[in-house]
Image: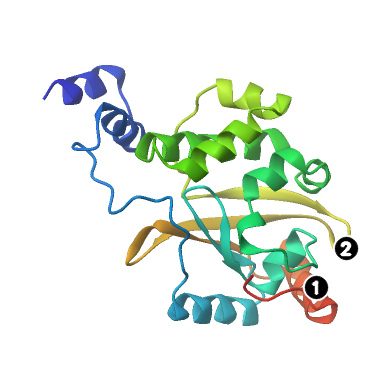
Amino acid sequence: MVLDSIARALRLNQTERDHLFALAGPILVPVRRHAGAWQRVSPLTYELLDALERADIPACVFNHCLDILAANRPFWALHMRQDARPARDNSLPRFFFLDPDSRRLYLDWEHVATDVTAMLHFALGRHPDDPRLNELIGELLENEDFRRVWAAHHVYERASGTIAFHHPIVGDFSINYQLLRLPGDPEQFLFACTAAQGSLSASALKRLAKWAGTRGHPSHN
């Protein structure tokens, strides 16, 4: 196939190949359903979030637009959220680019900004006609920082990595994250944060979870 030859010539990785095929047309990379509709989180997923909370693990579920569909209390505490905003306002990209607190919270803001825009580029390749996704990107393009990072046109889904935080309650620490597609819905992702056992970062996560339990952060959404 011509696209296979192009992908080999460009030495694309698997994510970049998928993006190329998605741009070529919906027949080549079938999407399970149109993604514009708001998505529900299964009861089993809520149980998983609760189990992770009991293990002091911040975790959330988001969709291809990076809308947070559900999260546990340690996750909200990690992002200094105390109010139960409507679910449709729980947009990670909006927080990241439009809320000045994000620059104080993320020690390596530019690195995470690249990851966020790369995932949005990837999602746009799969869902070019999704009205919610296009509305979100259109809104973010009014932001100078987003325009700059978006123009680099990175395209990927990062399955794991490390993020460093400067948290006003528990101080500086780093988490290791895993990003997993949930079974039964390829447009939902579980994002979970851990730290090496016995490390200062693990201690910070425990203190964060304890603080979250005393502050009444909303559980799930």
Image quadrant holding the C terminus, namely bottom right
The quadrant where residue 90 appears: bottom right
Residue 57 in the image: state x and y as whole percent.
Answer: 63, 71
Q: Is residue 158 left or right of residue 57?
A: left
User: Depth check: 68 or 193 in front?
Assistant: 68
Q: Secondary structure at mark 2?
A: loop
User: Depth check: 46 or 174 in front?
Assistant: 46
Q: Amino acid at mark 1?
A: Arg
Q: Please tell me whether residue 139 is drawn above or below residue 209 in the rendered image.
A: above
Q: Please tell me whether residue 88 is drawn above or below residue 31 in the rendered image.
A: below
Q: Please tell me whether residue 110 is drawn above or below residue 44 in the rendered image.
A: above
Residue 31 in the image: state x and y as whole percent.
Answer: 28, 48
- The numbered mark at residue 207 is 1
The quadrant where residue 1 appears: top left
Residue 3 in the image: state x and y as whole percent.
Answer: 19, 24
Q: Amino acid at mark 2?
A: Ile
- Count residues near mark 2 (Cα–Cα under 10 Å), then give few for <14, some for 14-19, many for 20+: few
Instruction: Please report the residue visible at 70 percent of the width from the left and 70 percent of the height from the top.
Output: 74
Dot 1 and dot 2 residues touching (CB under 8 Å): yes
Instruction: Please report the residue visible at 72 percent of the width from the left and 64 percent of the height from the top.
Output: 85
Residue lying at the far right of the rendered structure? 168
**Residue beneath label 2, please?**
169
| Residue 38 visible in rendering | yes
